[in-house]
Image: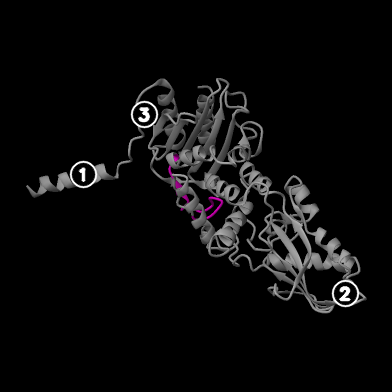
Amino acid sequence: MRRTLGLLVTLLLLVAVLPTPIAGAASSGGTFCKSLRTRLVHGGGTASGLFVVDARSGKPLCARAAKRQRPLASNMKLFTTSTVLSRFGPEATIATRVLAEGNIDERGVLHGSLFLQGGGDPALGTPAFYNRFLGGLGTDLYGLQHQIEAAGVTAVTGRLYADDDIFDRRRGVADSGYATSPYIGPLSGLSLNSGYRTADAGSFASDPARVAASKLASSLRASGVRIARGIGLGDADEAEARTIAVVRSPSIDALVNNTDVYSNNFFAEMLIKLLGAEFGNSGTTAAGAAVVEDFARGKGTGVHAVDGSGLTRGNRASPWQVVRLLKAMRSTPVGEDFVDDLALSGREGTVALRMRGSAAEARCRVKTGTLTGVSNLSGYCFNASGRELIFSVLMAGVGSLDLAHYEQDRIAAAVAGL
C-alpha cells in the first residue's frame, strides 16, 4: 500500500512540473509544425524549444517545450534593449560633461580643477577608434577640448579629475567574476573606446576612467592649455562646479541598433548599468537587471536577468516568454524602432551571411545568441503573403554550431514562407 501511495505521489509531482500546453498550438500535428520540431531537435538536441505565433491574431502555430526556460545567450539583449528603448525613448542621448570648480581669471587661468564627468556613454571614444571598429558610431571626446578652449580656459592650477561615479567599479559581469573578461571591455561610468587602452584595440585598460581623462588632458596640452597637477580620480561637487563643456552620444535608438545588429556585449552591459543608475537604485548590473525584469513583468512576460548581454548562462527565459515580449513590443510607441533595430536576415550584422536564397532572406528581423552548447534565434518574419509571424528557437543541446545554424535558418525559412 505504501509503495502504491508513493508511486501515486511521484506521478502527481511529475504532472505538476510538466510545462503547461500552449492552447491552440499545432504541437502534435500538421506538416509545418512537425518539420519545425524535427529540425529543432536535429540541430539543438532534445533540450531545445520553440514557439511560433501569428503576430496579429496571437494564434499559436507551433510549439515544442515552449514554456521551459533555457539559457538566452545573446537573446538576452532583446530584453535589455526593449527596456532601454522604452524607458529612455529612442531620441534620448547620454551626456559626458566637463565641469569647472574654481574661478577663471582675466587671463583664462582656472584657479581650481576640471572634472571629466562620465554619463555611462558606451560610444564615447576617438574618431580613430569608432570610425574603424564601430562604423563611425561614436561620441567624439575631442569635442570637449574645443568647448573648453571656447570657454576661455588657458591653464588649470589644479588637476583634471576623472569622475566615473555614475557606475560602480566592477569591470565585468558574473560570467567573469565581475572582472574584465576576454569577451568584453572593462565597464566604467567613464569609458573610452569600448574599454580599450589604445585606439587600435590592442589591449584592455586597467582603469578606463583614467585613460579617458589622460586622453583629454593630452589633447588640451597639445592645444596649449596647461594643467599644472596632471590627472586623478575624483567626484565633482555639483553644487560648487559648473558645466563648461558637454558632448552627447548618438541616439538611444542608434546605440540599441548597434547592440542588437552586431550583438555588441560592451554596449549591452553599459546600457543595463545605465538603466540601474537612472531607474533603479544604483549604477550596477544587478540594479539594471531588476529594472529589466520589472519591465518584462509589465509586458506580461518574464526573464531571469543576470547581465545585459547574455554572457552569463544564468540569463534564462522560455521561447514563450521571448515571443510574448516580442509581441508586446509591437503595440508600444517604440515598437517600430525596436523591430528595425534587429538584424535583417541575409543582409546585416550577425546574420549577414545567413538565410540567403531562402524565403527568409531580407524578410526576418532577428537576434542570434551563442554560448557553448547553446544557439538561439528569435524575431519577426514579414511574409510575402502579408502575414507577420513571431518565433523563438532556443537550442540548449548543441553539438555543432554549424548544424544548429543550418536548422535554424530552415526553420526561419519555413516560418517566412507560411
Marks 3 and 1, how far apart in space?
25 Å
Whichever of callouts 3 and 2 sits on the residue coming sooner in the sequence is: 3
Give the numbered dot on residue 108.
none
Q: Residue 164: x, y in percent?
A: 67, 67
Question: On the image, numbered disc 2 is attached to which residue?
Answer: 155
Where 139 falls versus 380 (above or below)? below
Mark pair 3, 2: CA separation: 72 Å
Q: Nearer the viewer, residue 347 or 38?
A: 347
Q: Residues within 10 Å of mark 2 (few under 14, many from 20)?
A: many
Residue type for callout 1: Leu
Q: What residue range appears in magenta?
A: 306-319
Which of the two marks, 3 or 1, is nearer to us in this view?
3
Residue beneath label 1, please?
12
Q: Is residue 312 magenta?
A: yes
Element type where label 3 sits in the image: loop
Give neighbour class at mark 1: few <14, some 14-19, many 20+ (Cα, 10 Å). Answer: few
Name the spot of residue 70 as percent of width and height, x first: 43, 45
Q: Which residue is mark 3?
A: 24
Q: Amino acid at mark 2?
A: Ala
Q: Quadrant of residue 219?
A: bottom right
Q: Residue at x 16, y 45 (%)?
A: 7
Give the foreground label among 1 and 2: 2
